[in-house]
Amino acid sequence: MDFKADGFDWDEGNWPKCAKHGLSKPEIEYALRHDPIVLMDRTGRAEQRFNAVGRNRKGQRLFVVFTVRVIGAAVLIRPISARYMHEKEVRIYEKTKKA
């Protein structure tokens, strides 16, 4: 990412949606802090969102949709949805990464 975030914005609005796929907060935060591939989300929403592909400490690939919020002087990453990548997505990711 080309910006430095001060932390993460978790609350009862976003955490349950991320947790329902079996991921933990530290796992999501780790993936977003350790060199993820980040692209602009193209869904056309008013709020600017990003799609990220990263890995947890075990090397499993995660797909995370997030936005960036400025709260006071802090720049925070707000995960919106997170899940483990499906095997087909992993193959596409690996093929794209090699190209």
Image: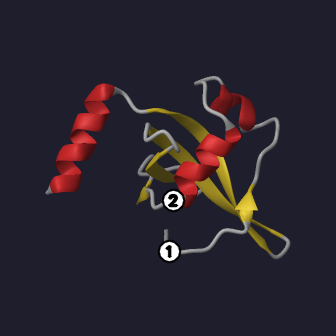
The one of 83 and 44 positioned closer to us in this rendering: 83
Amino acid of disc 2: His
Q: Could you say whether the residue bearing mark 2 is in a helix, strand or loop? A: loop
Task: Look at mark 2 in the image and give the residue it sits on.
Answer: 34
Task: Name the residue: 49% across, 68% down.
Answer: 1
The one of 22 and 70 positioned closer to us in this rendering: 22
Q: Which mark is residue 2?
A: 1
The one of 29 and 66 positioned closer to us in this rendering: 29
Specify the quadrant that holds the C terminus: bottom left
Task: Name the residue: 41% across, 51% down.
Answer: 42
- Residue 75 coordinates in the image, percent (x, y): 72, 69
Residues at badges 2 and 1 in contact (C-beta under 8 Å)?
no
Amino acid of disc 1: Asp
- Label 2, residues with CA under 10 Å away: few <14, some 14-19, many ≥20: few
In-image side of 64 versus 20 (left or right): left
Q: Is residue 57 above or below residue 7?
A: above
Q: Could you say whether the residue bearing mark 1 is in a helix, strand or loop? A: loop
Q: Residue furthest right?
A: 72
- Residue 38 coordinates in the image, percent (x, y): 43, 58
Q: Specify how the rendered protein is coloured.
A: secondary structure
Q: Which mark is residue 65?
A: none
- Residue 11 coordinates in the image, percent (x, y): 81, 42
The one of 65 and 46 positioned closer to us in this rendering: 65
